[in-house]
């Protein structure tokens, strides 16, 4: 399985790309647009674009760190590559990247984007606030550079730059993105909404939600009329109840940030969205969906 994203992302849904491609096909959405309001690593979006399943992708993330990386990769490709190529993968570089992140939004978007990239590739599970692989003393079995193959990563970023005319990058909150922003996007578009997890979001994401945020998002999603959509979440009773008006199915997929186990997820589908009966969740195995009995939540 090819991974088109240069980012490692906790809970990344790259393994769902085959399934999402099937959703596109079943709903006559191939060759249209594809949007992610919580893009993160954008692995699904990039695969759909680079395998020509869709003609344009919309990558949005309110997190400045994530946004600055994608803005740099798409629109300042050569500058970002030059930084990656010239920066040694050392603890000194890690300290500098961490300091850039701590300072927050700056006018130098490439420096911010690079700091996000560097920390993502050198921190445990790709978590920006996580510790460096191998520890500060680099005494662990795995060292800081074990997930930092410069040549491979540079090639991925260079390829992203080649698609810049077909990639839109924004930094909007979900309500604005799903509302006013999407009004101008062609109706032939699938929106994949992958918000911060309900239970472990605070430990995985910089911009995590509390309960009222999840409720507010569900209300916004429920008002989408122009486009087809689906949502994925951790499979908890609160989420199943919030989205009880919509069809739901559960599945399992593996995550490195979850003790190398298989996380139970729930998929929520917008009205009229046809979907396949099975999901590609690994290279060799199909994981069956199980329809949820929401009334028993």
Image (cartoon, rainbow, N blue to C red):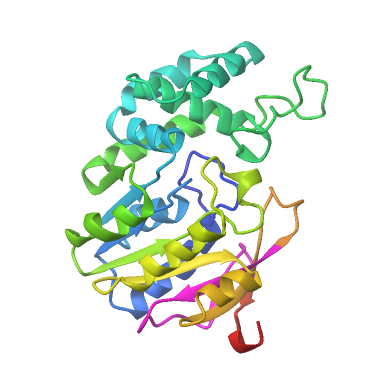
Determine whether 69 is above or below 94 in the image: below
* Residue 224 or residue 59, whichever sits in front: 224
Q: Do we see residue 89 in this rendering?
A: no
Q: Is residue 293 left or right of residue 167?
A: right
* Residue 229 or residue 159, whichever sits in front: 229
Q: Do we see residue 200 in this rendering?
A: yes
Q: Is residue 229 left or right of residue 188?
A: right
* 138 inside magenta stretch: no
- Find the magenta span and give its range: 263-285
Residue farthest front in this picture? 212
Which residue lies at the image location 35% right of the left edge and 40% below the top edge? 160
Which residue lies at the image location 52% right of the left edge and 83% below the top edge? 277
Quarter of the N terminus within the rendering = bottom right
* 265 inside magenta stretch: yes
Residue farthest top in this picture? 92
Residue 100 % position (x, y): 49, 19
Determine whether 103 is above or below 71 in the image: above
Determine whether 162 is above or below 248 in the image: above
Determine whether 202 is above or below 34 in the image: above
Which residue lies at the image location 39% right of the left edge and 18% below the top edge? 82
């Amino acid at each position: 399985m090819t991974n088109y994203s240069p980012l490692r992302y906790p809970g990344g849904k790259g393994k769902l790309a085959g399934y999402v491609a099937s959703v596109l096909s079943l709903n006559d959405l191939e060759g249209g647009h594809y949007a992610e309001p919580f893009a993160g690593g954008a692995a699904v979006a990039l695969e759909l674009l680079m395998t020509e399943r869709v003609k344009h992708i919309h990558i949005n993330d309110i997190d400045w760190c994530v946004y600055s990386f994608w803005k740099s990769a798409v629109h300042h490709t050569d500058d970002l590559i030059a930084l990656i190529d010239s920066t040694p993968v050392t603890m000194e570089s890690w300290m500098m990247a961490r300091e850039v992140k701590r300072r927050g939004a700056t006018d130098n978007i490439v420096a911010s984007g690079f700091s996000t990239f560097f920390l993502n590739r050198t921190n445990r599970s790709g978590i920006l606030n996580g510790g460096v692989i191998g520890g500060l003393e680099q005494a662990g079995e795995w060292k800081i550079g074990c997930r930092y193959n410069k040549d491979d990563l540079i090639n991925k970023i260079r390829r992203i730059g080649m698609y810049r005319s077909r990639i839109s990058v924004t930094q909007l909150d979900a309500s604005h993105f799903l509302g006013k922003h999407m009004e101008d996007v062609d109706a032939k578009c699938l929106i994949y909404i992958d918000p911060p997890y309900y239970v472990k979001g605070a430990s995985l994401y910089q911009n995590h939600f509390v309960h009222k945020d999840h409720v507010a998002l569900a209300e916004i999603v429920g008002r989408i009329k122009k486009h087809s959509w689906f949502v994925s979440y951790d499979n908890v009773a609160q989420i199943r109840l919030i989205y009880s008006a919509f069809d739901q199915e559960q599945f399992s997929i593996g995550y490195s940030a979850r003790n190398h186990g298989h996380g139970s997820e729930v998929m929520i589908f917008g009205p009229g969205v046809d979907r396949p009966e099975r999901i590609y969740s690994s290279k060799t195995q199909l994981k069956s969906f199980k329809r949820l009995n929401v009334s028993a939540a």
